[in-house]
Image: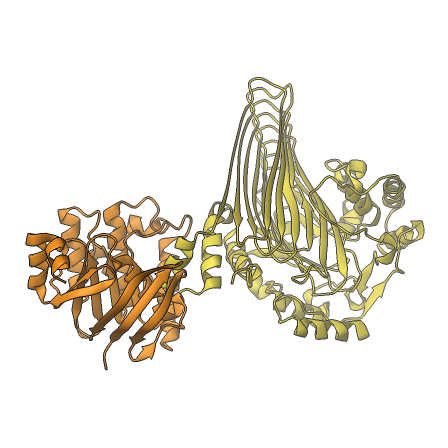
């Protein structure tokens, strides 16, 4: 594999800044490059999908062809050649593993390098992992244990077969196919992702976790996740992402849909560490993600927490549609950009239900010559009596070549609505730097400490085991940002 | 060997020379006081010693344990044993006190080639030292210096000194903003750290601190020069007659 050797050499040259920039040498099966109906049929056939699923995909594709890539974000993206991407790549040995023993040891070693607790032993820590490698879900642990409480946690490709009625009912119900350019693309070509169903009254007995990794060169990853929490249920879901270091840009266009019924609560946490490209902006992941949750039932709650440190380009607005009476939406975000990274991220809180409440806490850190934009919409619809929103957007600048931008949209169509927006922009002061360094901390340790302090309100929303990793990530991603 | 040797030290900020040639030698076990009126260069001296950016040494030498520190960054000097108790400690929003203190202590331990201290042992160590300085658990849980009163900030500085066990401690106007009781607690904390392990340089405008922390030597700094040195009685002379007479005589 010439490409692999090339990449390894490139990684070694690039000073090893990106800790997850290794490539796993496994044989893969790929569909030919490019996108057309045949490719979609190929993907569908590979997954042995029923006819309705294929039709859904083809409709999405037809829709996508009529759409245009959005250009309203504060992002400078070269034109993407959608015919130059592989839309399906599967590790050859990974088709249908029945247990961990059947999973390619090379893959397991990869996950070990990533620090994912995949084997059952480590699972005692209480995390069930659905690991998605390029386009296929490799292993889902702890499924039996979950099944006992009636929780379904499996690859979505499997749910299409085992629970077609649920998939049919909910897929595209929160993020319609034609919602935007990337959701249409995802709907046409999505390869895998997680499916979670929490029955009525069940509190999911463990944190559920998915780990995404893009290994194959020139592949796009189009995962699709669907989480349904029935009345009075609870689930906490974690998602982590990495990709090897490559000179080419790779595309990631995911769709995540959450549905919370009456009194249900979904906590969705992401630590995103896709390869950001080098300091000059060469390579890196283009991350175009549509995440949306519907608080359908009264008193339902959806909380998004994200720590975004990677990707060359991030275009992502995890949102809540607050339909239920007294429903609650929360968005906690840390977005770190360094080098030549660009992030345009934020949320949308759509208040439809009476007494619905939302909280937005966004912390943006810009370093190097990066650009970091918060873009958020708070919309109170006419029937949303007494809706409340509180938004706090803080930006921290490291160095003097980066940019921080805040673009809040506030639309209130009900006079009883209460909307608050606070925003600050600051930089690490020379006094703070000197104080920490006088205590023996070097420049990078100081920046990491102060930045983590700046993000603390958000970090404390993360599950414990993720918080530690996220803290370290923030330190790593700011390396070389000073001096 | 002398612990700290300052030879003909000249330093400027921007184009303005503030220190015009300072000579001072401090040995282990000694406490020196530097007194002087406002604008005499006291704080500049503390920043030049600790390596703050923006303070340029134009001539002379600073030796710590016989090694020049002039090419060392502030954090390298700190890890080599130089400590500055700040006149105005800065707030670090969101930075938990315990993790900050532990990071600092571990940086110093790493430099000495010793094992880092684990969390549990560290908490024990901090609690013991904090108690003596009247720093309670609640304060340790807060973000560094955030919402601290003037007295609390100064006690926190001395706590850090007690944890880091520097060989050379510079205390910049540690008495400013302290009431009588706080001054006594802080001074007791400092006195407990006196001994053969370290030298101290106490910078102050007023004599009152020096009746609590009794120095072995007193130097008068005025106009960027040490104009007179003596023992603790020199501080009383300043108290009684002010700086003017001394400056005129020099």
Residue drawn at (81%, 52%) of the image: A80
* In this picture, residue B145 sits left or right of residue A37: left
* In this picture, residue B138 sits left or right of residue A54: left
Quarter placement of the C terminus of chain B: bottom left
Residue drawn at (65%, 59%) of the image: A141
- Seen as rendered, the residue at the extreme right is A38
Coordinates of residue A65 in the picture (x, y in percent): 89, 42
Up the image or down, A326 lies above or below B244; here it is: above
Q: Nearer the viewer, residue B58 or A280?
A: B58
Residue drawn at (55%, 18%) of the image: A416
Coordinates of residue B60 in the picture (x, y in percent): 32, 73
Residue B50, quarter of the rendered image: bottom left
Coordinates of residue A33 in the picture (x, y in percent): 88, 59
Coordinates of residue A386 in the picture (x, y in percent): 55, 21
* In this picture, residue A125 sits left or right of residue A57: left
Quarter placement of the N terminus of chain B: bottom left
Q: Nearer the viewer, residue B234 or B135?
A: B234
Q: Is residue B192 visible?
A: no
| Chain letter for the yellow colouring in the rendering | A
* In this picture, residue A36 sits left or right of residue A386: right
Q: Is residue A435 visible?
A: yes
- Seen as rendered, the residue at the extreme top is A415
Up the image or down, A227 lies above or below A356; here it is: below
Q: Nearer the viewer, residue B53 or A186?
A: B53
Q: Nearer the viewer, residue A382 or A285?
A: A285
Total labels: the figure holds: 0
Q: Colour of chain B?
A: orange
What colour-coding does the image apply? by chain
């Amino acid at each position: 594999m010439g490409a692999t050797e090339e990449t390894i050499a490139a990684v070694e040259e690039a000073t090893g800044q990106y800790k997850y920039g290794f490539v796993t040498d496994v044989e893969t099966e790929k569909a030919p490059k490019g996108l057309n109906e045949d490719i979609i049929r190929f993907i569908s056939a590979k997954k042995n999908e029923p006819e309705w699923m294929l039709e859904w995909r083809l409709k999405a594709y037809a829709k996508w062809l009529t759409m245009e890539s959005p250009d309203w974000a504060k992002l400078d993206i070269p034109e993407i050649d959608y015919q130059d991407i592989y839309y399906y790549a599967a590790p050859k040995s990974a088709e249908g593993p029945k247990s961990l023993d059947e999973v390619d040891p090379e893959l397991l070693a990869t996950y070990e390098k990533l620090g994912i607790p995949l084997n059952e032993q480590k699972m005692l820590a209480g995390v069930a992992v659905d690991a998605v490698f390029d386009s296929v879900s490799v292993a889902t642990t702890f499924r039996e244990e979950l099944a006992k409480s009636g929780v379904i946690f499996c690859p979505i490709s499997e749910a299409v077969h085992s629970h077609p009625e649920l998939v049919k009912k909910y897929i595209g119900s929160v993020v319609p196919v034609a919602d935007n350019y990337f959701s249409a693309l995802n709907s046409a070509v999505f390869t895998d992702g997680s499916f979670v169903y929490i029955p009525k009254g069940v509190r999911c007995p463990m944190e559920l976790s998915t780990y995404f990794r893009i290994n194959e060169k020139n592949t796009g990853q189009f995962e699709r996740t669907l989480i349904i929490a029935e009345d009075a249920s609870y689930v906490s879901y974690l998602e982590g992402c990495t990709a090897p270091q490559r000179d080419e840009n790779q595309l990631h266009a995911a769709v995540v849909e959450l549905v919370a019924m009456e009194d249900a609560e979904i906590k969705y946490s992401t630590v995103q560490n896709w390869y950001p490209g080098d300091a000059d902006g060469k390579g890196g992941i283009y991350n175009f993600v549509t995440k949306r949750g519907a608080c359908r039932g009264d008193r339902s709650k959806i909380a998004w927490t994200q720590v975004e440190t990677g990707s060359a380009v991030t275009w992502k607005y995890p949102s809540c549609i607050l339909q239920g009476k007294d429903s609650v939406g929360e968005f906690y975000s840390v977005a770190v950009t360094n080098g030549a990274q660009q992030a345009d991220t934020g949320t949308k809180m759509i208040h439809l239900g009476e007494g619905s409440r939302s909280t937005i806490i966004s912390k943006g850190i810009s370093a190097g010559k990066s650009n970091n934009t918060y873009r958020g919409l708070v919309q109170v619809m006419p029937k949303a009596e007494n809706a409340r929103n509180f938004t706090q957007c803080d930006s921290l600048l490291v160095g003097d070549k980066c940019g921080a931008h805040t673009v809040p949209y506030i639309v209130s169509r009900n006079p009883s609505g209460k909307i608050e927006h606070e925003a600050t922009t600051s930089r690490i002061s020379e006094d703070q730097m000197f104080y920490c360094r006088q205590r023996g901390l070097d420049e990078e340790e100081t920046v990491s400490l102060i930045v983590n302090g700046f993000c603390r309100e958000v970090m404390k929303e993360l599950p414990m085991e993720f918080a530690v990793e996220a803290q370290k990530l923030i330190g790593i991603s700011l390396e070389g940002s000073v001096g | 060997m002398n612990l700290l040797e300052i030879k003909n030290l000249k330093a400027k900020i921007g184009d303005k020379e503030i220190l015009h040639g300072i000579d001072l030698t401090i040995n282990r076990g000694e406490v020196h006081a530097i007194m002087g009126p406002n604008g005499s260069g006291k704080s500049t001296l503390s920043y030049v010693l600790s390596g703050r950016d923006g303070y340029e040494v134009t001539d002379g030498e600073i030796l710590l344990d016989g090694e020049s520190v002039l090419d060392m960054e502030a954090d390298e000097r700190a890890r080599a044993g130089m400590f500055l108790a700040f006149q105005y400690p800065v707030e670090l929003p969101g930075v938990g006190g315990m993790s900050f203190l532990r990071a600092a202590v571990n940086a110093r331990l790493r430099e000495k080639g010793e094992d880092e201290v684990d969390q549990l042992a560290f908490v024990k160590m901090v609690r013991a030292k904090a108690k003596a300085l009247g720093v309670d658990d609640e304060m340790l849980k807060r973000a560094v210096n955030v919402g601290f009163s003037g007295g609390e900030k100064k006690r926190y500085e001395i706590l850090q000194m007690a944890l880091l066990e520097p060989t050379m401690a510079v205390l910049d106007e540690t008495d400013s903003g302290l009431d009588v009781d706080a001054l006594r607690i802080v001074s007791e904390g400092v006195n407990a750290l006196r001994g053969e392990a370290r030298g101290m340089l106490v910078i102050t405008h007023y004599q009152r601190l020096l009746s609590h922390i009794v120095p072995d030597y007193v130097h008068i700094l005025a106009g960027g020069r040490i104009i007179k040195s003596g023992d603790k009685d020199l501080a009383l002379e300043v108290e009684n007659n002010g700086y003017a007479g001394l400056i005129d005589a020099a």
